[in-house]
Image (tube, grey):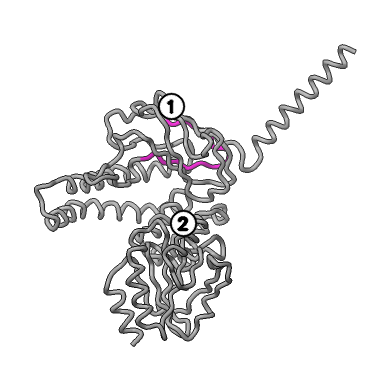
Amino acid sequence: MTVHILLMKRFFFIMAITVTLMASCRKGDGFAITADIAGLEDGNAGVTVFGNRDAFHLTSADSSGKTIEVKDGRFSLEGTTAEPVVVRVWFKDKRFYKFAPGGGYYPSKSCAMWMIVSPGSRFSIIGNVTKDDFISVYATGDKENKAFAELNSRMMPLLNRSVNITVQMDCDATLTPEIKKQKEAELQAPIEAELDSLRRNFVTGHPSSIAGLWLMEDMLVRSQIETEALEEPLTRVDAKYRTGYFYKAVSSRVEGAKKSAVGNSCPHLEGTTPFGNHFEIESLRGKYVIIDFWGTWCGACIAGMPAMKAFRDAHADKVQIVGVAQGSPEDEWKKFVADRKLDWPNIRTGEGENDFVTSFNVQGYPTKILIGPDGTILYRASGESEEFYSELDSLIN
């Protein structure tokens, strides 16, 4: 009887270990990353994910799922991910922030630690930032991160020099705004040239890597590279990367740039308005349409809305506006549209076929696109300027 009980206990113990091992090997499970960075202050650090955010689950974070603890320079990232993602860890240590004299700070990639987290990632990061004013430690725990470190170890010091120049110019009260602008441009020019060469060489030399594909998307979003320059590197991406988020995002933007270029027919656009009505862009055929890509978070977008409405009202028989909001919670978006009395169709961008930011290759906010009465794209521009409406007036009249 005693032997039987012992055998049963052993059986259940083995079964429990087996289940645990199977769970840890299951796709999407099991990354564990530790860091020991001398010079980091105790406190919390924020975690931001780039890529398929829904695939990533951080179990070592607090209840928000976005903050981890740093103690004696040590922290850990543990959880699951169904596919590789790029992770940014940004620390609350004020030494790494680039504060503006008027309040706030200048964002820079160099103020954070970057790494690639894949299913099954297991590595440690060891370094020292005691003497640095930026995060000069790079993950090298696997092939993907070694490629990423090759980029970041050269890019981050340049980005740090660049943002330091911006802060220096902004804090110099002895210079007029015009001289500040001129002097900063002169100081930044060689750094920008070096960064541009570094980035372009990296994406052409490392297309089959998460780092290369992430950089392609990042450059496209920031208008740092032409979509045509990525067509050839994309043909050299290995098959194993082609089902992942970053390849799909880049290839969709490249395709979207072609389809949404001036002279082409407007891609399909549809969605639900804040009032629950279904909208399709084809319903406005016969009118000129300004497609306005905006967000409730975008100050320039909001500041430009009165001028856009005034232009529409001055050409009410010919022109209509369609707003496409990005990055705003639904309740906040609905309230904004109602409070500001935006009396034109408004929808939100989504994912997949409804990712209009990608299908229209939006690279900045606001982006405005003029569609002709026959559905042809006539003009597009990013930012706010009076010249935009002068150009529209000449096209319409």
Q: Which residue is rendered at x = 48% and y = 79% of the image?
A: 265
- What range is drawn magenta here? 112-125
SS label for mark 2? loop
Residue type at mark 2 is: Gly
The answer to whether 149 is drawn above or below residue 75 in the figure is below
The answer to whether 181 is drawn above or below residue 3 in the figure is below
Q: Which residue is rendered at x = 57% and y = 48% of the image?
A: 54
Q: Is residue 152 left or right of residue 259?
A: left
Q: Quarter of the image for the C terminus: give it.
A: bottom left
- Residue under label 2, please give it: 327
Q: Work out whether residue 128 or residue 370 is closer to the camera in this orientation and state it.
A: 370
Q: Where is residue 148 in the image (x, y as percent from the top left)?
A: 42, 44
Q: Is residue 345 left or right of residue 183?
A: right
3D distance between C-alphas at marks 1 and 2: 33 Å
Q: Which residue is rendered at x = 27% and y = 43% of the image?
A: 160
SS label for mark 1? strand
The question of residue 96 being in magenta is answered with no
- Secondary structure of the magenta portion, mostly? strand
Q: In which quarter of the image is residue 36?
A: top left
Residue type at mark 1 is: Arg
Q: Position of residue 112 (x, y in %)?
A: 37, 40
Q: Where is residue 221 in the image (x, y as percent from the top left)?
A: 40, 59
Q: Which residue is rendered at x = 36% and y = 26% of the image?
A: 38
Q: Quarter of the image for the N terminus: give it.
A: top right
10 Å crowding of disc 2: few (<14), some (14-19), many (20+) = some
Q: Work out whether residue 288 or residue 246 is closer to the camera in this orientation and state it.
A: 288
- Residue under label 1, please give it: 74
Return the mark for residue 152: none
The answer to whether 72 is drawn above or below residue 49 in the figure is above
Tell me which label, 1 or 2, sits earlier in the chain.
1
